[in-house]
Image: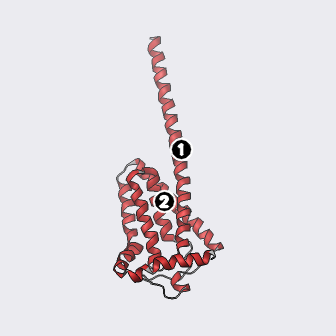
Amino acid sequence: MNLTEINITLFRMVNDLGKEHTYLNSVFSFIAEYLVVFLVLSVLFSWFTRNRENRIMIISATITFIFSIIVGKVLGLFYSNYQPFVELTGVNLLIEKEVDNSFPSDHTILFFSYCFSFWLFKRGVWILSLLVATLVGISRIWVGVHYPFDVLTSIIISFSIAYIIYSIVRDKGSGFSSQSGTRCLSLRLSKQIRFTKQ
């Protein structure tokens, strides 16, 4: 079994669940199309808290998204495939989608760029954001518009760039902190010297 066959088999496993459990179709359709609204609202909320750390996190996540999309588009020049509902028969298609290259999944890149960044900066309960992003990735397969490899590639791209951006910001932050600490120490020493002279 080659990679294409594995990709199709995995797609069928997920997409056919919608035929067996029709009561979940509306849930996954909502997640696939409209959960992005909640992502936008959470980003805006974090930004307008005016917390410096939150704003750095949002900027980092946005940079991650931009670079991830660029990498995805470049990869799409070397490999491409239409959506499953175009290439396969019997697909359980639940949402309307324009026919184009589905590799990789821009929707998944969007969610994982932000959710990976949120988790890297905050950790702890923010692991839940990754679970939400995973649901989005699965939902794109469930509704019939992406293959598993489209989604998996998007996750790898997003995580790689999110980690690089986070590492750069963290190193810059630690450098700034150490410089500030050195300045504070120098000021204290100079004050002590002046006091001793007096």
Q: Residue 178: percent from the left, percent from the top?
A: 51, 35
Disc marking residue 62: 2
81 vs 190: above or below:
below
Q: Earlier in the sequence, mark 1 or mark 2?
A: 2
Q: How is the image coloured?
A: secondary structure
Quadrant including the N terminus:
bottom right
- Place of residue 45 in the rendered image (x, y in percent of width and height, measured from the top left): 35, 58
- Quarter residue 48 falls in: bottom left
Position of residue 49 measured from the top left corner of the image (x, y, whole percent)? 34, 52
Count of marks overlaid on the render = 2
What SS does tag 2 mark?
A: helix
Q: Visible in this render: residue 80?
A: no
Q: CA distance from mark 1 to mark 2?
A: 18 Å
For badge 1, the amino acid type reads: Lys
Question: Which residue ends up furthest to the right in the rendered image?
Answer: 78
Q: Is residue 49 left or right of residue 162?
A: left
Seen at 36% across and 63% down, the residue is 41
**67 relative to 99, above or below:** above
Work out whether residue 83 or residue 12 is closer to the camera in this orientation and state it. 12
Name the residue rendered at 49%, 21% in the picture: 190
Residue 37: x %, y % from top left: 37, 68
Residue 170's place in the image compared with 25, above or below, is: above
- Residue that extends furthest to the bottom in the rendered view of this protein: 89
Task: Name the foreground residue: 162 vs 52.
Answer: 162
User: Please, what secondary structure does the residue beneath circle 1 have?
Assistant: helix
Q: Residue at x 50, y 66 (%)?
A: 109
Amino acid type at circle 2 is: Thr
Residue 172, which numbered label? 1
Q: Nearer the viewer, residue 106 or 187?
A: 106
